[in-house]
Amino acid sequence: MIAGEIPLAHLLLERAEDAGWDARTPAEVDGEVPFLILDCGATEDDPPLQGGPQAICLHGGSLAALDPGGAAVGFHALPPLEAGGLVELTRGADSLDAAATAAERFFATLGLHTEWVGDAPGLVLGRIVCQLVNEAAFAVGEGVGTPADLDAGMVHGLNHPRGPLAWGDAIGLDHVLSVLDALSDEYREERYRAAPLLRRLVLSGRIGQATGEGFFTYDLDEESD
Amino acid sequence: MGGGIAQLAVLAGARTLLHDPDHAALDRGVETLRANLAKGAERGRWSATEAEAASARLEPTYTLEALEACELIIEAAPERLDLKRELFARLAEIVSPTCVLASNTSSIPITAIAGAVPTNPERVVGMHFFNPAPLMRLLEVVAGEDSGEAALARARALGEAMGKVVIDAADGPGFLVNRANRPFGLEALRCVTERIASVEQVDRIARLGGGFRMGPFELMDLVGVDVGFDVSKSFHELSFGEPRWRPSPLSARMVAAGRTAASPAAASTTTATVRIVPTTRWRRRPICPERRAARSS
């Protein structure tokens, strides 16, 4: 069962179906205990789902914050999430071995590597990439350059796999902002404050590819990656 | 880096004067450049005729005064503001008032360099090439507070003639690209400092999970931990203490311990950053029964 509205949840549903899983949203689960619940919608106010081994997407906080004393493990990954990619996992003192085993097995069937790391909002890649998007948003907001020039610069000058702003649009700017806000809440450091431009885009509903507009605009009729 | 930029210029069809105050270094630079042009022809990057024509466009100059007739000068001197200011002030007296004076600096504010040319600072711009200049496709054209549109346009046009992807950036710490890349290293250092992951794990996660060609620590070793730490300090100073750009105490300890892996060769054999990786409880704890079984077998 895969819950949540961020693009990552939709991507995971797709990948799970491609790998032969009977992947369902919470509405489609009728009483049976699923092999694994992937909860991509957990926030501090919205506690994790119950009823089976469970992995919580840590974009809204650390595992300790989202599932205090609970049995779940935490995970985080970013699009494009293709075969050969990697998903980070974390566990707390009370996480069940069953959840850890199920999560490892599930991601392995999707052709993804797994890496066990320590607990934090967004884990390692989420933290690095969301801060890359944030720094880019600060630079654009301060008029240092245009989004198109910034992305072209990172790809052609530093060999990055994709520009940070287009990447942010693919991840979902709401997802990026929730990682930054969770880091800001848990660390209480100014370092993790979100760029005003990024927050305004999210507040105005421009969260990227999913809505057709973020730092760039997208044709919603066209199938895009 | 001056040699690489000169190679781009001669191949773009510009008559190019190369200068270095160290005459032996200048002669070596010219020799290397001509050899590179010949090598490129052998490898089919351009024809032998093109290489010869490009080579003929290159002239070593032993005095700054010989640069008098230039239309555009690209400075690639060491990254020291006093040195660059002195050079720009002297050049401004030698060349015509319309000659564009460009700096290939990656970290010094263009506005601070332009301050050495108070009569017409509008002709001072940044032309930031990426290492190695002949191979990396990007040119960042940087506008200082007083850079004029005519000078910026000429810098862009030259970049395009060199076959570069040209982007515009305003003055400020690290301009556009190096600034936007700050978190790649700094957040990686935080993850390791907080023992969320080891150096090797962070690099693997960046490569496999993020699709980056190199992990942040491999890159730090390649550039030199000491060089990276100096850059960090410069960002922090120029921004008056922006918290996102606070240098890492871990880098400071690495530099103090002399583990700087300055050259690519050193990076591949010693991986200087690895040794201080902590062992923490979560790393030792068996993850799940299957793993426990796999480990004991």
Image (cartoon, coloured by chain):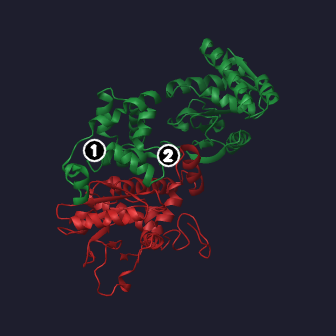
Chain colours: A red, B green
Q: Which residue is at a point 62% across and 12% down the rendered structure image?
A: B23
Where disc 2 sits, the SS reads: loop
Q: Is residue A111 left or right of residue B128?
A: left
Q: Which residue is mark 1?
A: B193
Q: In the rendering, at what x and y percent does residue B252 appear?
A: 31, 34
- Residue B71 visible? The answer is no
Q: Nearer the viewer, residue B13 or B279?
A: B279
Dot 2 corresponds to which residue? B213
Q: Quadrant of residue B115?
A: top right
In the image: residue B11, left or right of residue A81: right
Q: Quick one: which residue is furthest to the bottom in this view?
A: A30
Residue appearing at x 65%, y 21% in the figure = B32
Q: Quadrant of the C terminus of chain A?
A: bottom right
**Relative to residue B185, is residue B137 drawn left or right?**
right
Chain of the residue where label 1 is placed in the rendered structure: B
Tag count? 2
Report the amino acid beneath label 2: Arg
The mark closer to the camera, 2 or 1, is 2
Q: Picture coordinates of residue B166 (x, y %)?
A: 65, 46
In the picture, the disc for residue B20 is none
Up/down of B131 relative to B25, above or below: below
User: Does residue B16 appear anywhere in the picture?
Assistant: yes
Marked residue chain, label 2: B
The image shows residue B36, relative to residue B146, as above or below, that is: above
Residue nearer the viewer, B72 or B86 = B72
- Which quarter of the picture shows residue B160? top right
Q: Earlier in the sequence, mark 2 or mark 1?
A: 1
